[in-house]
Amino acid sequence: MTTQLYTNGRIFTSDTRRWAEALLVQDERILYVGDAHTAARLSPDAPVTDLGGRLVLPGFVDGHAHVIGTGEALGQVSLWGAKSVEEIQQRIKTRDTEDPGTDRILATGWLHGVIPGGVPEAAMLDAVVPGKPVYAFAYDFHSVWVNTAALAELGIDDHTPNPHGGTIKRDSQGHATGYIDENAFYDLVLPFLDSQVDGNQHGASIAAVQQAYRETGVTTACDMGFNETDLAAFKRADKDGSLTSRLIAYWRVNSTGSAENNIAQVQRAAELAVEHQSPFLRVVGIKIIIDGTIDGCTATLGMPYADGSNAEPIWSLEELAPVVAAADAAGLKVAMHAIGDESVRIAIAAVEHAVAVNGPRERRHRIEHLELVDRADVDRLAALGITASMQPVHADPAISENWAAKLGDHRVERGFAWPWIREAGACLAFGTDSPTSPHAPLPNMYVATTRASALDAAAGTNVPDFALPLAASIEHATRDSAWTCGAEHDIGRLAAGLFADFVVLDTDVFAGSAAALLEAKVVRTVVGGRTVHTKK
């Protein structure tokens, strides 16, 4: 056994006793958290690490991420912050000039609001890269904008049908225009791109995101959309011991239009939940996408958008309810993407059905995003024990102008209503949804505590009355994210018996202005008692 004493720190525990000054670690778990004198008596011969008065936090548990996608995005053309089609074109053209030998160009992060009409066309990309496939993922990762060469290699033509719950955008003559959303994106584009990537490239993406997580203090990520390709890559990484952050996976279940096929996907997830329970790789549930996004006008609302349109759900309640009931019966946790208020009601009704069918049992089902929700529905989900899994960075004012314009009325003032969740007594779990947003947790905490922008200081605020205290925000991004995954006895807090997963910051973000969250750096990351990152 090896023991290590960390002392002379200001330790925020995310536990009942929020603050401590010493942390005693034995092997991979915490032996004691509390005062320095008791820690020294418990293990008088333990080597001592003097924290120099610095702030210690539990390792962040990103409650909603796409982990391999985050690693892939680190190597793609960044379209974040691009304010026009011309700027997007220039960034993509620059990559083609700098790397002319690549087979295709992948880019990520464009905003619907910078595209005239909100729907891009292949010709805009053809103008700068005409002969090589280009795939530009929208910031929300619910749609992709491609050029003509990409349409050709995908095999998408005038006769390609729209898959259930997705759309290939077409012009008045029926020709594909280069914009593909929802299940058309997930079913036609992503599998093709996965088939073009070998195991080494997936391994490189995992290595890239592991480094990014070490440097920013993410010690666990909950992957929302795990598939066979991801599983194979992570099994290799887990076996060779290269993982430095834990992964808790929710298996993607697609709406196929076939009840039998839908249930078969649930059964596959149940098998994997039994097979994969290592400290660094677990499958615990399923992920279902009920609707799209407000920015793309594909989220399902109780009232129409400002332009009078609305969107049908990807999953109707009739299709969804038996899937949720089957997963519930198998002991799986169900995560349901629901951004619009009507899709939130569909998700709640599906859980009600599972309760009625399966009877009393422990449940930790969750709704992802809940960007627009009625107060009465918050009370309903709280009473059912449903977690609200939300991402503060999606409320960043720098990216919310188009979001607000699409709603166009009083509904804007109830967007991202985190205090309602707390008031109702529901669990609130925070994440980033990277790569749809930056993966770093501290800027995420800045948006949560200020409702100001972590991307643009001039962007103003977004419903500032919905800001939360810093301590509560960190607890939602550590303790509560762990709890909703069923991992509260291993991670999310600094308490005796849990894994020694923690981070040390160079700045006490509790002591000054909230702006410190944008400047603070992680100087040490410890996972399972092992220091995996240090920075002077």
Image (cartoon, helix red, strand yellow):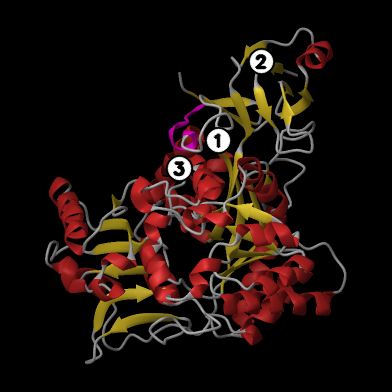
Which residue corresponds to mark 2?
A: 8
Residue 296 in view in this figure: no
Q: Nearer the viewer, residue 247 or 469?
A: 469
What is the spatial separation of the Cα atoms under label 3 and label 2, in whole angstroms? 31 Å
Q: Specify the amino acid type for callout 1.
A: Thr
The extreme top residue here reads: 45
Q: SS of the residue at dot 2?
A: loop
Q: Looking at the picture, which amino acid does disc 2 mark? A: Asn
First to last magenta residue range: 516-523
Q: 329 above or below 470?
A: below
For the residues labelled 2 and 1, say whether their Cβ atoms are less than 8 Å apart: no
The front one of 49 and 105 is 49
Could you give the CA–CA distance between mark 2 and mark 1, rounded to whole angstroms? 26 Å
Q: Is residue 25 visible?
A: yes
Residue 477 percent coordinates (x, y): 61, 46
520 in the magenta segment = yes
Q: Does residue 492 belong to the magenta stretch? A: no
- Say what secondary structure mark 1 lies in: loop
Q: Quadrant of residue 7?
A: top right
Name the residue at 72% across, 47% down.
Answer: 487
Of tags 2 and 1, the one toward the viewer is 2
Which residue is disc 3 drawn over? 209
Mark 1 surroundings: few (<14), some (14-19) or many (≥20) residues within 10 A: many
Q: Quadrant of residue 110?
A: bottom left
Q: Is residue 108 left or right of residue 337?
A: left
Q: Which mark is residue 244?
A: 1
Instruction: Reply above or below: 405 against 53.
Output: below
Residue 371 placement, left or right of 212: right
